[in-house]
Image: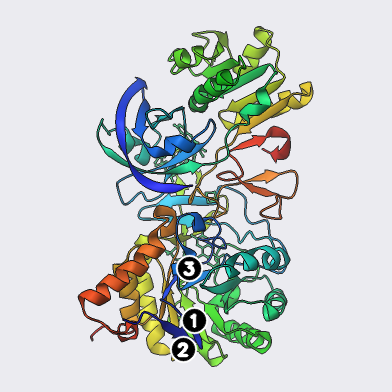
Amino acid sequence: MNTKVTIAGVEFKNPVMTGSGTFGSGMEYGEFVDLNKLGAVVTKGVANVPWPGNPTPRVTEVYGGMLNAIGLQNPGIDVFMERDIPFLKQYDTKIIVNVCGKTVEDYLDVVEKLGDAPVDMLEINVSCPNVKEGAIAFGQKADALFDITSRIKKVAKQPVIMKLSPNVTDITEMAKAAEAAGADAISLINTLTGMKIDIHRRTFALANKTGGMSGPAIKPVAVRMVYQASHAVKIPVIGMGGIATAEDAIEFLLAGATGVAVGAMNFVNPYATVEIVEGIEEYMRKYQIEDINELIGGVRE
Amino acid sequence: MKQKMTAKVYSQTEIAPGIFDMWIETPLADEAAAGQFIGVYPKDKSTLLPRPISICEVNKKDGMLRIVYRVAGKGTGEFATYHEGDMVEILGVLGNGFPVAEGTGKKVVLMGGGIGIPPMVELAKELCESGVSPVAVVGYRDNKLFLKEDLAQFAKVYVATEDGSEGTKGNVLTAMDENDIQADIIMACGPMPMLRGIKKYSEEKGIKAYISLEERMACGVGACLGCVCKTKKVDHHSHVNNARICTDGPVFDAEDVEI
Ligand SMILES: Cc1cc2nc3c(=O)[nH]c(=O)nc-3n(C[C@H](O)[C@H](O)[C@H](O)COP(=O)(O)OP(=O)(O)OC[C@H]3O[C@@H](n4cnc5c(N)ncnc54)[C@H](O)[C@@H]3O)c2cc1C
Ligand SMILES: Cc1cc2nc3c(=O)[nH]c(=O)nc-3n(C[C@H](O)[C@H](O)[C@H](O)COP(=O)(O)O)c2cc1C
Ligand code: FES
């Protein structure tokens, strides 16, 4: 039985990854799961310099999910390279570094610094709804996305995944712009912009007012967008959004995703990632599927 | 090691209106200490995140943890319906806990306000076991003095009530003054205005104070960066002035945090 998938020449032992920002750099959940069993660990977004993030409250629960407005707090690329990459190198899993920035130059700075680092892929976050400057703007206009993607591709030494925002009118247009600019893969969805109001205090639940929604409640939107995007481009798609179980993950594979990431559900079930790896294998045995690649895009019309 | 597990409710009673006292059978008791907390998961899948609840008491011999909580919303509302023998999903043990050893040879004053009182029980007990006789100054809204008797087993207790129905009328600091209580070190948990008051009080008097902070949490284990508080020094993990309350705290040296 083969569970290996290949994305832009990088081979993953299975398609299961972690959603950026929900798994730190693996240290915290390494206490719960064997990181060696994961296809990849995708790190929290890292910028060229440390970012303090947004004021609190930064997280709040909503029906079947949550809103977050962390604001991409991160220790900066220098600390990250000294601490987080060596930590992850101890494990037999692929390392995907999620990169954030406020200007194109910020992104290029991080991508350049990572040039010689032993990481397998870069995931470029142009879709964080929680940072006022830059960032999201690159992910909501096709021409801006094309521009930043091509500039990153010029300096990147590792294959580049562009992480797309669902907060757009036409996801296929964005997917095509990333592909045309040379992206090696795309991942989606990032969080959906939401809001919650505390009616007793008559205040916003989050200090940032708006936050990104994630969790099981967003899954149908994510599956639809992964399906549309994977049919619009030839480059591989990594799907995420509300994945809680192996059944959810398989739905994304059938919709057209080559990889799948588990985000907010790590908070609910810290063992989710490994249980999904095992559940996919069980499903393959049950339906006598020899190669996981048979499932990718395998939904019958 | 931290883990998520299914545990059994050993008992549950309502000890004051809307305040519940639950003993849970769990091997996590082995590792638990005063000031740490657990995440309790509601069964209703529309409410996914673990609810952080402080450890009120630890019974290592029988492998049990005690939590005392106020019904505040959907999750705690669900927990309040549990009975002896029901199963409950918990995540733990979380957080750092109070520095009990620092109390040795000192006049230790514990301060608890409202639903911040529960962790003071285990703290008083552990201090007692280490040979310290703590004083506990606890603040309530009214004369529903939950956990007062529990505390009295391990500490000399002074009470303040907002409505003046018992003890000193006012808050824990009013009770400190009124009873002329001296402290070398304060350990406290309670609402933010009380903790701010204690921080100021300890700075003015030059007393060490350890305070337990609260913030909205998602993961509870340090991964999501949801639960930060401002720190004076650049934090070793974040490299900005933010510490994670769920892992670097919830107990902080009052000097180190900006609240
Ligand atoms: C470290 C720590 C220890 C705590 N210890 C205790 C305790 O011993 N006893 C007790 O009664 N309460 C304690 N709390 C507060 C308790 O976590 C909340 O009252 C509880 O989460 C409310 O959940 P709910 O579903 O009933 O309320 P809802 O309002 O329905 O909850 C919605 C969401 O907001 C979160 N939330 C709501 N209020 C708070 C709050 N005050 N702090 C953090 N998150 C909140 C919930 O966890 C949930 O994710 C503690 C909080 C923290 C951070
Ligand atoms: C607390 C939190 C922090 C996140 N931080 C990042 C981030 O730094 N970079 C990023 O690209 N996406 C970030 N995301 C988005 C997730 O990686 C994922 O795309 C999204 O949450 C949808 O998946 P889910 O429903 O499984 O969580 C974050 C999500 C959450 C909940
Ligand atoms: S709750 Fe996630 S870091 Fe503290």
Q: Tell me the number on the disc at residue A36.
A: 3
Q: Position of residue B158 (x, y in %)?
A: 57, 11
> Image quarter for residue A73?
bottom right
Labels 1, 3: one chain? yes
Q: Position of residue A48 (x, y in %)?
A: 71, 69
How far apart, in angstroms, are the residues tagged by discs 1 and 2?
7 Å
Q: Position of residue B179 (x, y in %)?
A: 65, 7
Give the side of residue B171 with respect to residue A287, left or right: right
Residue B158 visible in the shown view: no
CB of mark 1 near ligand 2 (< 8 Å): no
Q: Amino acid at mark 2?
A: Ile
Chain under callout 3: A
How far apart, in angstroms, are the residues tagged by discs 1 and 3?
24 Å
Mark 1 nearby-residue class (10 Å; few <14, some 14–19, many ≥20): many
Question: Are the residues at dot 1 and dot 2 in contact (C-beta closer than 8 Å)?
Answer: yes
Q: Which residue is mark 2?
A: A235
Mark count: 3
Q: Earlier in the sequence, mark 1 or mark 2?
A: 1
Q: Which residue is mark 1?
A: A186
